[in-house]
Amino acid sequence: MPLRKLTLDEARRLPLWRQPVALLALMAAAMPIAFATWNALLNNFVIEAAGFTGVEIGWLHSVREVPGFLAIGVIVLIMFIREQVLALVALVMLGVATALTGWFPSLGGILTITMLSSIGFHYYETVNQSLQLQWIDRARAPQVLGWLIAIGSAASLTSYGLLVVTWKAFDLSYNFVYMAAGGVATALTLAAFLLYPQFESPEPQLKTFVLRRRYWLYYALQAMSGARRQIFVVFAAFMMVERFGFEVHEVTALFIINFVANMLFAPLMGKAVMRWGERRALIFEYGGLIIVFLAYGGIYYFGWGVVLAGALYVIDHLFFSLAFAMKTYFQKIADVPDIAPTAAVAFTINHIAAVFLPALLGYLWVQSPGAVFGLAAGMAAASLMLAMLIPRHPEKGHETVLSGTAVSPAE
């Protein structure tokens, strides 16, 4: 691993492919190769290998979200490990755990390996969010974040495309695909260790617990986002397998459509947030999600078909991709030294409901799947009301429409 350390100003003189944004792009590509492949195979793997029902899938996702709830531990780790190094170590952990997933086709084995991969995923995501907000210029942040989403979508699309083409043609096994995807993600991450210097952020990050009163709206948006998103992540794709009998290549084909849409629209969404602001972007997202979740419920209550379900899945992802507007909202109101510890706190807040909600809703799912999506629509409505409190031009001292005067950064 290179020992050279560069400030962000010095890094601008490097070739474009060795600059901080290029490293963010490489990590944005490596992570979904492992995670998206794991996710694409998950529902079929657990049903075929371990006989999962809605109850077991709920418990699986509750276990998967425990490391997200404990993301606050990043604050302790960055006392001893640089954020850039921690992000890459977490990515390696995700890659290795993904590679080993197929070796444990039982409830206990799947839960254990899921916990290990989840530690890598959530700690990477926590630190990656912090690095993005430190390394990307605030004026360009929405557009650059949109491009990073598009890069991740392209990596997922490549993984899914290979699955669709090769799964039946070569009669691939779950074990082979998991090992290949995890191995590639690990190799890319090790390359990032070797090719990039250590980048010094302009202001050192606080390495203590940070919970500020003036960030309360950001915390509330994170809490609602985490609860609402869990319902989609856990049950939307599971519905496609359980209700409509989708096979691996069919689920993967749906994911491909989804990520093509993200590749095309995420950069445009970044430009839209730059032009219209975080308030309007999030209001649009949450209003759309209310309609989407109500329509999901209609699939069960009124017998609407598979075409609508697939279309809703893609539309749902497009709305969720606007969630980066929460990051840029926080970037505008935050003190720079608060970014890393607040990213950890926000990730923990985001996962409070995620620890227990999937397991509880797994029991509701076996009684009334439509009611699960109705609950998600209610959560989207609550998020919409919170988004209306974001100012048109948020900044430090004007964090919400209720903030009439500047406040002390220490509050």
Image (spheres, rainbow, N blue to C red):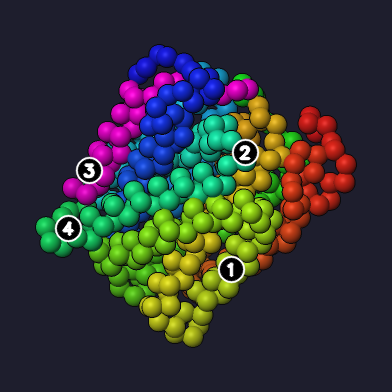
| Residue 271 in picture, x, y percent from top left | 56, 53
Q: Are marks 2 and 4 in contact (CB under 8 Å)?
A: no
State whether residue 216 appears in this view: yes
Region rendered in magenta: 176-203
Residue beneath disc 4: 166
**Amino acid of disc 3:** Met
Q: Is residue 199 magenta?
A: yes
**Amino acid of disc 1:** Gly
Quick one: quadrant of the N terminus? top left
Q: Is residue 281 above or below residue 197?
A: below
User: Mark 3 against mark 1, which lies toward the viewer?
Assistant: 1
Residue beneath disc 1: 288
| Residue 71 in picture, x, y percent from top left | 54, 36
- Of all residues shown, which one is farthest toward the left? 170
Q: Residue at x 26, y 57 (%)?
A: 161
Mark-to-mark CA distance, 2 and 4: 42 Å
Q: Earlier in the sequence, mark 3 or mark 1?
A: 3
Q: Earlier in the sequence, mark 2 or mark 1?
A: 2
Q: Nearer the viewer, residue 35 or 48?
A: 35
